[in-house]
Image: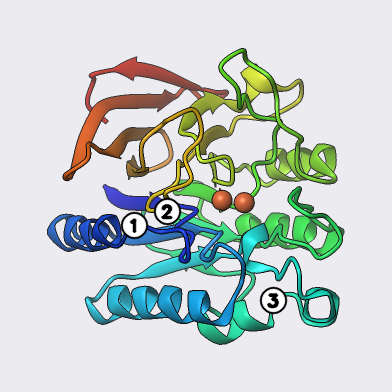
Amino acid sequence: MAGIAHLSDIHFGAHDPKIVAATEAWLQARQPDLVIVSGDFTQRARLGQFRAASAYINRLRAAGHRLLVVPGNHDVPLYDVVRRFAAPLRRYKRFISSDLCPWFENDEIAVLGINTARSLTIKDGRINHEQIALMKRRFAAVSPTKTRILVTHHPLFAMPIGKGGELSEAVGRHEEAVQGACEAGVHLALAGHFHRTYAEAARKMAEKAGSALIIQAGTATSTRLRNAEPQSFNWLQVRRNDRCALQVVAWNGTSFQDGDRVAFEFDGRQWNAHKGAGA
Ligand SMILES: [Fe+2]
Ligand SMILES: [Fe+2]
């Protein structure tokens, strides 16, 4: 069983310090095999914000956590036009990670991170052909007994973002990206960006979507909330390539509390949920 803490949208510069400290305490107590942060480390890609995010990441590393991180659109400078176009991810590479295609593999899981943050789009992300080829190549070399996990900041699919069920924009080249994820046999597609938690079988969201389970994380530590959904992150437990369980760990004003555990079983074609069952 692999334990994964999936945090996203930590947004230093618009963060709540006591919630930041609470994530560290939770991770220290739970000791996941992998901590994923799926982008938006800062609010405005400013130097001081990157320094604070870097200090957080370094504290997690110093505490012994293994991390896999990708940048988000807020990690590309918005107002500094020169920096935005000349070196959009220079600060991210300097302060957070120089690896834009991070990889983690153990006996149970193989995890690939892909950078979807771009200069030319203000908030909507994009995947390029080399990234799609990389995804197929890397996962093709993985034992079929492992769970293949893709991490992006922007979800591959249009997501429900409003109370009325309105859909977001999908990531650029999403049809090719979804096709690539399908061919690569991606089991779990983890993302953030919308500050909303969500889990759904890809097949229910789009035709030809393949067998991935789409899992969205909320914002872990930002004070900018959507639809008053509290700060949260996801706790995932994954067993081989056919079982996983998801718990949303949500901030209740004073501490992080584990929410309902939803177990999913992969039947060879898609993931099916069994609320309350074990993984
Ligand atoms: Fe965000
Ligand atoms: Fe974002």
Q: Is residue 96 visible?
A: no
Give the mark nearer the N terminus: 2 vs 1: 1
Residue labelled with disc 3:
89
User: Residue visible at 51% across and 41% down?
Assistant: 195
Q: Disc 3 to disc 2, how far (Cα)?
A: 28 Å
Name the kind of residue labelled 3 in the image: Leu
Q: Disc 2 to disc 1, how far (Cα)?
A: 32 Å
Asked if ligand 1 lies within 8 A of label 1, the reply is no
Residue labelled with disc 2:
109
Say which element carries label 2: strand
Residue labelled with disc 1:
16
Q: Nearer the viewer, residue 83 or 141?
A: 83
Q: Disc 3 to disc 1, how far (Cα)?
A: 24 Å
Q: Is residue 27 left or right of residue 266?
A: left
Name the kind of residue labelled 1 in the image: Asp
Asked if ligand 2 lies within 8 A of label 2, the reply is no
**Most distant residue in the left direction:** 29
Q: Position of residue 249 (x, y in %)?
A: 28, 39
Viewer-side label of 2, 1: 1
Q: Nearer the viewer, residue 31 or 134?
A: 31
Q: Is residue 215 left or right of residue 127?
A: left
Q: Is residue 47 visible?
A: yes
Q: Quadrant of residue 169?
A: top right
Label 3 with label 1: CB-CB less than 8 Å? no
Q: Position of residue 25 (x, y in %)?
A: 17, 61
Viewer-side label of 3, 2: 3
